[in-house]
Image (tube, rainbow, N blue to C red):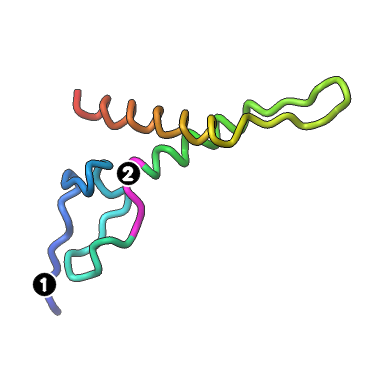
Amino acid sequence: MSEQRVVNQTEHHDGKGPRAFPISADEFFDRGMTLRDYFAAAALTGIIQCAYRNEDNNLILPDQVDAAEHAYLQADAMLAARKK
């Protein structure tokens, strides 16, 4: 059985936070999403829940660009909170 070193979960990649799903060092390093992307995806699901129906029963969704930007702002806040 070959020995595999698991990438340290505190290692950062391009300043975007540690990997959400670390892989062994023997595998290609750039696979998988960053923890920042994982947090943003989780935040985005909550932001999308802010959709509502107007008086004509049309579904009104948050602006996509605003929603994505807010999701990453929330992700950055979660990463900052991890350092405390």
- Residue 50 position, x and y percent, is 63, 26
Majority SS type along the magenta span: loop
Callout 2: helix, strand or loop? helix
* Up-down relation of residue 2 to residue 53 (above or below): below
Q: Residue at x 32, y 44 (%)?
A: 35
Q: Which residue is mark 1?
A: 3
Pick the residue in front: 61 or 32.
61
Over which residues does the magenta segment extend?
A: 32-36
**The stretch drawn in magenta includes residue 34:** yes
Q: Is residue 55 left or right of residue 34?
A: right
Q: Quadrant of residue 55?
A: top right
* Up-down relation of residue 54 to residue 18 (above or below): above
Q: Is residue 67 left or right of residue 36?
A: right
- Residue 46 position, x and y percent, is 55, 31
**The stretch drawn in magenta includes residue 6:** no
Amino acid type of the residue that numbered disc 1 sits on in the rendered structure: Glu
Point out the image quarter for the N terminus: bottom left
Q: Residue furthest bottom?
A: 1
Q: Residue at x 39, y 44 (%)?
A: 38
- Residue 58 position, x and y percent, is 82, 30
Amino acid type of the residue that numbered disc 2 sits on in the rendered structure: Leu
| Crowd class of label 2 (few under 14; some 14 to 19; many from 20; radius 10 Å) | many
Q: Residue furthest right?
A: 56
Callout 1: helix, strand or loop? loop
Point out the image quarter for the C terminus: top left
- Residue 81 position, x and y percent, is 27, 25
Q: Residue at x 47, y 38 (%)?
A: 42
Residue 35 disc label: 2
